[in-house]
């Protein structure tokens, strides 16, 4: 009779332990970019529509050059002669900061409105303004503060500088080491400032329709947040020592059952 009770308790504890350690996630909850095996999903990637626009508080590196009269171009380069051993932090300090009105203060020319313009449009605008000073000017622009923030259930959360000024949602998540197994893949949150207002968008990583999203490509200062799934939330509200306690009790009951059996 005692053996039967011990066996019952042992079986019950083992089942509880298996339940606690088992995953309730299905393939549908975990696999990215799923599509029907019989009906292909056709998506249009918004690659041709992707254009980064300058925003207030952006920090711009602007370099003017000219093969015809290079000395004339030097007056527009505020960091001319200081490029040797220049670090990223130095460039941040010496860049052109776009003010709250969307303007930069450019040498000789004065204020130039650049907010809501693409880099190509700003290049054309600067070229037009300096033509009377520099013949055949070449204008190069980089956004020094092109950064995205990735938080939540990813392997390496943090702030990432994007040097090529172009990154998609999957690329950003890969940069952070991908989602952990506890990351909620159905509603990855994107927070973005548009026209001075905070906007929130959501992505379903399990659907290939993400590729056709107008927000597939990130812009500077975007924030991605991966929320924890139900398993992670439940585990955070329970005693973390429960699995260990159950393991110890199971081992003790196993030993007790062994001694009673062979007593």
Image: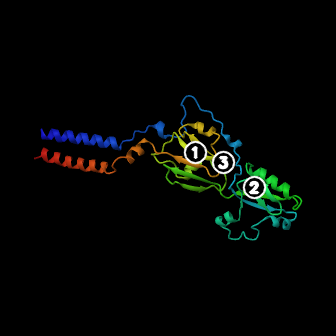
> Where is residue 31 drawn, in percent x and y?
50, 40
- The residues tagged by marks 2 and 3 sit, at their Cα atoms, a distance apart of 16 Å
> Where is residue 78 drawn, in percent x and y?
76, 66
In this picture, is 83 found above or below 239?
Answer: below
Q: Residue at x 20, y 46 (%)?
A: 253
Q: Residue at x 85, y 54 (%)?
A: 128
Residue 61 in which image quadrant: bottom right
- The residues tagged by marks 1 and 3 sit, at their Cα atoms, a distance apart of 16 Å
Q: Crowdedness of circle 3 by 10 Å Cα count: few (<14), some, many (20+)?
A: few
Q: Residue at x 81, y 53 (%)?
A: 125
Q: Secondary structure at mark 2?
A: strand
- The residues tagged by marks 1 and 2 sit, at their Cα atoms, a distance apart of 27 Å
- According to the image, what is the colour scheme of the structure? rainbow
Q: Are marks 1 and 3 in contact (CB under 8 Å)?
A: no
Residue 143 in which image quadrant: bottom right
Q: Earlier in the sequence, mark 1 or mark 2?
A: 2
Query: Residue 215 got which mark?
Result: none
Closest to the camera, between mark 1 and mark 3, is 3
> Where is residue 71 drawn, in percent x and y?
85, 68
User: In front: 72, or 252?
Assistant: 72
> Where is residue 234 drawn, in percent x and y?
39, 44
In this picture, is 247 found above or below 32?
Answer: below
- Tell me the quarter of the image containing the N terminus: top left
Q: Which residue is denoted by mark 1 in the rendering?
A: 190
Q: Secondary structure at mark 1?
A: strand
Q: Which residue is denoted by mark 2 in the rendering?
A: 103
Residue 210 in which image quadrant: top right
Q: Which residue is denoted by mark 3 in the rendering?
A: 196
Left or right placement of residue 16 versus residue 49 in this view: left
Q: Earlier in the sequence, mark 1 or mark 3?
A: 1
Q: Secondary structure at mark 3?
A: loop
């Amino acid at each position: 009779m005692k053996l039967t009770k011990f066996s019952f308790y042992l079986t019950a504890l083992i089942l509880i332990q298996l339940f606690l350690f088992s995953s309730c996630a299905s393939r549908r909850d975990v696999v990215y970019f799923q599509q029907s095996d019989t009906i292909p999903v056709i998506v249009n990637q918004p690659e041709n529509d992707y254009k980064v626009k300058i925003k207030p508080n952006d920090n711009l590196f602007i370099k003017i050059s000219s093969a015809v009269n290079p000395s004339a171009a030097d007056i527009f380069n505020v960091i001319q002669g200081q490029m040797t051993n220049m670090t990223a932090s130095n460039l941040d300090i010496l860049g052109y900061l776009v003010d709250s009105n969307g303007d930069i203060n450019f040498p000789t020319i004065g204020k130039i409105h650049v907010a809501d313009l693409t880099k190509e449009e700003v290049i054309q605008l600067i070229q037009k303004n300096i033509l009377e000073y520099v013949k055949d000017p070449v204008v190069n622009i980089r956004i020094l503060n092109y950064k995205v923030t990735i938080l939540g259930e990813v392997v390496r959360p943090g702030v990432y500088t994007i040097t090529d000024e172009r990154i998609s949602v999957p690329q950003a998540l890969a940069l952070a080491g991908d989602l952990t197994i506890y990351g909620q893949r159905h509603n990855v949150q994107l927070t973005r400032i548009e026209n001075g207002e905070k906007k929130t968008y959501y992505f379903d990583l399990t659907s290939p329709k993400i590729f056709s999203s107008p927000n597939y490509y990130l812009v500077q200062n975007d924030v991605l947040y991966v929320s924890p799934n139900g398993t992670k939330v439940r585990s955070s509200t329970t005693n973390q020592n429960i699995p260990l306690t159950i393991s110890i009790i199971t081992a003790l009951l196993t030993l007790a059952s062994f001694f009673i059996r062979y007593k």
